[in-house]
């Protein structure tokens, strides 16, 4: 994936994260605290990509896993993490 494709993917994901959590998300371990932390983490990555700065250290997947979250939002975060690793200019 290109940098611009990953930026677009991150923007879309942040928009989805900003919506009220669905019942299924809550059952999969999400809550407003994790939601806000995930938005903050993704915004940090987005800003670094926009400025072509090094990405923040840490693992999206491990962080969310440590929070105990699962489900569709977690799966999308895993895909983003993978795309960051294979990203090209």
Image (cartoon, grey):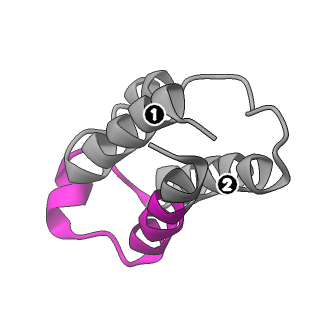
User: Magenta region: which residues?
Assistant: 8-31
Q: Where is residue 12 in the image (x, y as percent from the top left)?
A: 44, 69
51 left or right of 37 in image? right
Lateral position of residue 6 relative to residue 70, left or right: right
* Residue 27 marker: none
- Residue 11 magenta: yes
Q: How far apart are marks 1 and 2 (CA)?
A: 12 Å
Q: Is the residue marked by circle 2 packed among few (<14), some (14-19), or many (20+) residues within 10 Å?
A: many
Q: Which of 9 and 5 is in front in this view?
A: 5
The residue carrying pointer 1 sits among few (fewer than 14), some (14 to 19) or many (20 or more) residues within 10 Å by Cα, namely some
Residue nearer the viewer, 72 or 83: 83
Give residue 1's position: percent from left, percent from top: 44, 43
Q: What element carries label 1?
A: helix
Pointer 2 residue: 46
Q: Which residue is drawn at 56% across and 36% down?
A: 88
Residue 81: image tag: 1
Mark 2: which secondary structure? helix
Viewer-proximal residue among 40 and 44 = 44
Q: Quadrant of residue 57?
A: top right
Question: Which x, y percent locates residue 44?
Answer: 73, 50
Among numbered discs 1 and 2, the one appearing first in the sequence: 2
Query: Tags 1 and 2 in contact by the CB under 8 Å rule?
Result: no
Is the C terminus in the top left, top right, bottom left or bottom right quadrant?
top right
Q: Is residue 20 above or below residue 46?
A: below
Q: Was residue 10 drawn as part of the magenta stretch in this picture?
A: yes
Q: Can residue 64 be seen in this view?
A: no
Q: Where is residue 20 in the image (x, y as percent from the top left)?
A: 37, 77
For image coordinates 85% across by 40% down, the residue present is: 53
- Magenta highlight: main SS: helix
Q: Does residue 52 appear left or right of residue 63 in this picture? A: right
In which quarter of the view is residue 74 placed? top left
């Amino acid at each position: 994936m290109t940098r611009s494709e990953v930026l677009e993917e991150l923007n879309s994901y942040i928009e989805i994260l900003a919506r009220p959590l669905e019942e299924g998300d809550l059952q999969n371990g999400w809550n407003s605290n994790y939601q806000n932390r995930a938005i903050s983490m993704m915004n940090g990555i987005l800003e670094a990509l926009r400025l072509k700065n090094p990405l923040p250290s840490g693992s999206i997947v491990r962080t969310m896993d440590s929070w105990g979250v699962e489900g569709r939002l977690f799966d999308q975060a895993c895909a983003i993490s993978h795309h960051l690793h294979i990203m090209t200019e």
